[in-house]
Image: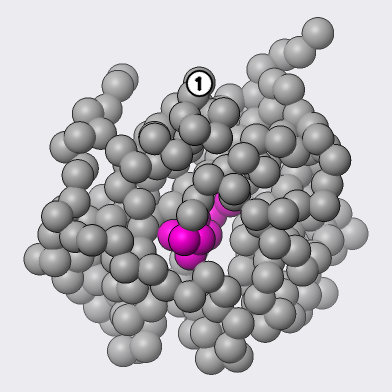
Amino acid sequence: MSVDLSSYASALERVLEPEVMDSAEDAHEYDAMDHRAANASFVARLVELGARGSMLDIGTGPGTIPLLVCAAIDDARVIGIDLATHMLAAAERHAAASPHRARVEFRRADAKRLEFEDGRFDTVFSNTILHHIPDPLPFLREAARVLAPGGCLLIRDLYRPTDRTRLDALVAQHAGNDTPYQRKLFADSLHAALTPGELREYANAAGFARAEITVDSDRHVSLQLRKTATT
């Protein structure tokens, strides 16, 4: 079912966050937040879209999702990249305690300048990193470049609320029991996010015109492609 993206237009100006969350405090506070439901939903969508094989996680953060993907998809082999060294350190700690350690690799890399060859990955995914990037176009173009023909794509992010009242309500609902610092992280992320309509425009410009935009929750939007057979 098509979604009227114009109904999600926002009166809030996009206010950028730092592109890289690379302090020990940022990594600790983000990793301590309860992302279990959102992460489970993300992995379930990947399975639904037919994700398999060699995968790239752009902006892996503390590395939780690659391990969940390997638990859910038997042939998954995931490279997770991030620019934040403290996040990657957390990812390595999580991986060391996981039975799926051999199928996951973490690297420090820039999403806007990937060092992988064209069509390298059967699946490309990214969870809540897009709002950290001032200009999403190079990021999306790189994701398109390294995705194999017929491959599976899932780029999910927050979307900017319609107004400040709505933003404050989302923070109260989803981070009301978190620390003040964690609530600020969430509020800043919402303020830095694109609207679904803006994401559509960037996706079209990046070569993802046939990709679907789905509004997944009261705060999440996805750009997605289902895996298809190739000849």
The range drawn in magenta is 126-134
What residue appears at the point 44 percent right and 52 percent down from the top-left corner? 157
The quadrant where residue 212 appears: top left
Q: State left or right for residue 20 relative to residue 96.
A: left
Q: Is residue 217 magenta?
A: no
Name the residue carrying label 1: 210
- Residue 75 visible here: no
Is 190 displayed left or right of 62 in the figure? left
Against 38, is 75 above or below? above
Residue at the far right in the pictured view: 102
Amino acid carrying mark 1 in the image: Arg
Check the picture and name the quadrant holding the C terminus: top right
Q: Quadrant of the N terminus?
A: top left
| Residue depicted at x 37% and y 88% | 181
Q: How has the structure been colored for display?
A: one colour
| Magenta stretch holds residue 132 | yes
Give x and y (percent) for residue 94.
72, 74
Q: Is residue 147 above or below residue 71?
A: above
Residue 61 locus on image (x, y percent)? 62, 68
13 on left or right of 194: left
Q: Is residue 74 above or below residue 29?
A: above
Looking at the picture, how far across and down is residue 153, in whole percent? Answer: 60, 35
Q: Is residue 229 left or right of residue 75?
A: left
The single residue placed furthest to the left in the displayed view is: 165
- Can residue 231 be seen here? yes
Name the residue: 85% across, 40% down: 117
Count residues near mark 1 (Cα–Cα under 10 Å), then give few for <14, some for 14-19, many for 20+.
few
- Tell me residue 136's x, y (percent): 50, 50
Residue at x-position 53% and y-position 70%: 19
SS label for mark 1: loop
